[in-house]
Image: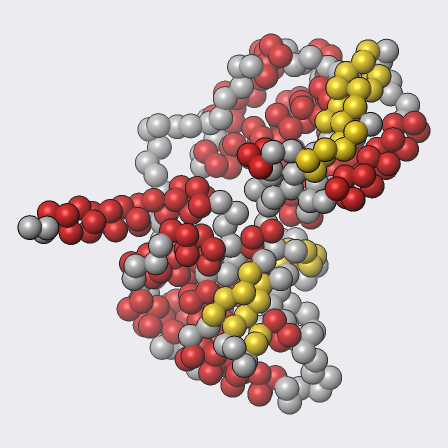
Amino acid sequence: MAVRQLPKEKATKDGRRWCFYDRIKVNGLTKLYVSKNYMTKSEAIKAERDFLVGLENKQINVTNMTFKQLYEEFYEYKKDKVKATTLRSYRRNIKQLSEFYELKIKDIKLEHYIQWRKRIGALDQRDKTKNGYYKLLKTILNYGTKWHDYNFTSIYNKMEKFNNPNRPPEEMKFYTWEEFKQFVSVIDDIKWKSLFEVLFFCGLRRGELRGLTWDNIDFYNNELSVVKNVVQEGDSRQYILTTPKTRTSTRTLPLPQKVMDDIHELYLREKKQYGFSEKWYVFGDKEPLSAHILRHTKNKYTQLAGVKQIRIHDFRHSCTSVLINNGASIMVVAKFLGHAKIDETLNTYSHLFKNKMDEIVQTMNNLE
């Protein structure tokens, strides 16, 4: 076995560059195994040791393994290697791979993939959603190749992402500053007023907002720190507390004074509750705010204000629109939103930056 640091261009989005690799025997054949990337050398070394122990104890017999069995093995393997949100997406997306369930993986052919693709392609869903199913299928096939030495070349080389050129792009919804002022003007509860102000001015993801605790608020420097993420299963009260989406999603954001004043007023009110702790959730109590209640309350205030209906995530788009339209650079916007790469910001908000490009051309035209 060997541990090495990969070049920067091969790092993951959150900067992981360390891996281990060696040649192992599977079903009597020798093949190169390369691990996933780790953040530090010590993490890679520990993972290497765990891998060796697992390899010694693993009895590989996949002659009659079905696709569903392969998925179940893959899922178990990933349990301690990916976030709870990723595992949840596996559980959700595997339902759209049902055609493969009972097929033995050695018998999977190109025609099975073609039939599956036709069905998925006919669904009235966004390409992004369909490509989630596609990505899981490829990931499972990769796992079968790596661990069981199956050859899916005849399928793999012909797989393509879903891209419907005839489907019109979805319009991005967001509130302008005037619309947001109208929305927030009908809110008389300081908790909800400050909550929607944080969404609008800080562009937090829903889980990041719900994960805020009072010890994440710095009243002295007028800042809040994003260090936690709440993941909820459906509309139940069951939730999981995780780290933010990516490494760069952990960030500290400045707050406008008017927002900080409202949060401070809420803080003084919440402190009077019995058993209050700085570990309490800012917009919940001992437990984080329910996603269902958040959505229901947003809908109520939307109707009262007479403004268009947008999703909770669209407040993040609203924040981005304000930043861009007031001259913020792409670097600043990406950092503020916690994007791992600037490409993500550009791909999502390119239409907003186009207006700024037009302004540059106008400036050049005005030069004497």
Is residue 70 visible to the viewer in this orientation of the structure? no
Name above or below for residue 56 compared with residue 320. Answer: above
Can you name the residue that lies furthest to the right here? Answer: 57
Name above or below for residue 126 compared with residue 253. Answer: above
Q: Nearer the viewer, residue 140 or 221?
A: 221
Location of residue 33 in the rendering, given as x and y in whole percent from the top left corner: 75, 23
Q: Residue at x 58, y 30 (%)?
A: 135
Q: Nearer the viewer, residue 48 or 308?
A: 48
Is residue 251 visible to the viewer in this orientation of the structure? yes
Q: Residue at x 52, y 27 (%)?
A: 120
Q: Is residue 190 left or right of residue 164?
A: right
Q: Quadrant of the N terminus?
A: top right
Name above or below for residue 219 compared with residue 165. Answer: below
Name above or below for residue 212 compared with residue 41. Answer: below
Can you name the residue that lies furthest to the left here? Answer: 368
Quadrant of the image occupied by residue 102:
top right
Location of residue 188 in the rendering, given as x and y in whole percent from the top left corner: 44, 82
Q: Residue at x 45, y 37 (%)?
A: 126
